Amino acid sequence: MLKFAILVSQFNDEICNGLKSGALSFLKEKGIHISPADIYSAPGAFEIPLLAQALAKTRKYSGVICLGCVIKGDTAHFEFISLGATMGIMQAMLHTETPISFGILTTYTEEQAVVRSEIGSAREAENKGREAAAACLSSAQMLAQITQG
């Protein structure tokens, strides 16, 4: 039985909650229940890789779905946080050999982030939280086939 953790940044609450709702909706459609105890908060996108790695190392989860949002401002902060989160998640995934999906929006405007995190609309299928959950589930299933076959 596959079990997943969801790790959500505390920044940009409305957007991150939309991503979380999208991920939960997708998993529910696939018959996968996520307990509230399996949903974790990260201070921000930069902290997600460490926390995702720690969750993966527990071996309680088939995968970790990382959700967050970094919106470009007037400084280079956006580039550093985005790159750090991206590389950190990739390294954590490779180090733990556990699927850790990248559902962190990196947008130039808040409007772009809102569109990518919408729920309850015709564009809900484009919700990047759904996509991150789908990628994590697919990777976990493929890993199970590889290790069992």
Image (cartoon, rainbow, N blue to C red):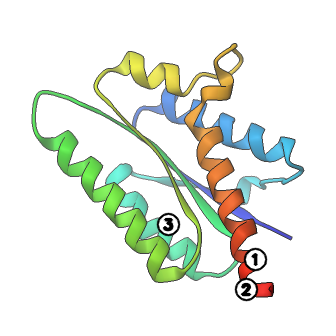
The mark that comes first in sequence, 3 or 1, is: 3
Q: Is residue 15 left or right of residue 149?
A: left
Among the 4 quarters of the image, the one containing residue 100: bottom right
Residue topped by disc 2: 147
- Residue 131 vs 91, above or below: the answer is above
Q: Residue at x 18, y 50 (%)?
A: 80
- Residue 45 vs 127, above or below: the answer is below
Q: Position of residue 60 (x, y in %)?
A: 70, 77
Q: Which element is circle 3 on? A: helix
Q: Position of residue 88 (x, y in %)?
A: 35, 65
Q: Which element is circle 1 on? A: helix
Task: Say if mark 1 contacts mark 2, CB within 8 Å.
Answer: yes
Q: Position of residue 117 (x, y in %)?
A: 55, 27
Q: Residue at x 66, y 81 (%)?
A: 59
User: In the image as oriented, which residue stretches furthest toward the bottom?
Assistant: 148
The label shown at residue 52 is 3
Q: Position of residue 34 (x, y in %)?
A: 78, 54
The quadrant the N terminus occupies is bottom right
In this view, the mark in front (3 or 2): 2
Q: Nearer the viewer, residue 96 or 60?
A: 96
In this view, the mark in front (3 or 1): 1
Kind of residue indicated by mark 3? Ala
- Between the residue at mark 1 and the residue at mark 2, the CA separation in whole angstroms equals 5 Å
- Between the residue at mark 3 and the residue at mark 1, the CA separation in whole angstroms equals 20 Å
Residue topped by disc 1: 144
The mark that comes first in sequence, 3 or 2, is: 3
Residue 40 at least partly seen: yes
Kind of residue indicated by mark 2? Thr
Kind of residue indicated by mark 1? Ala
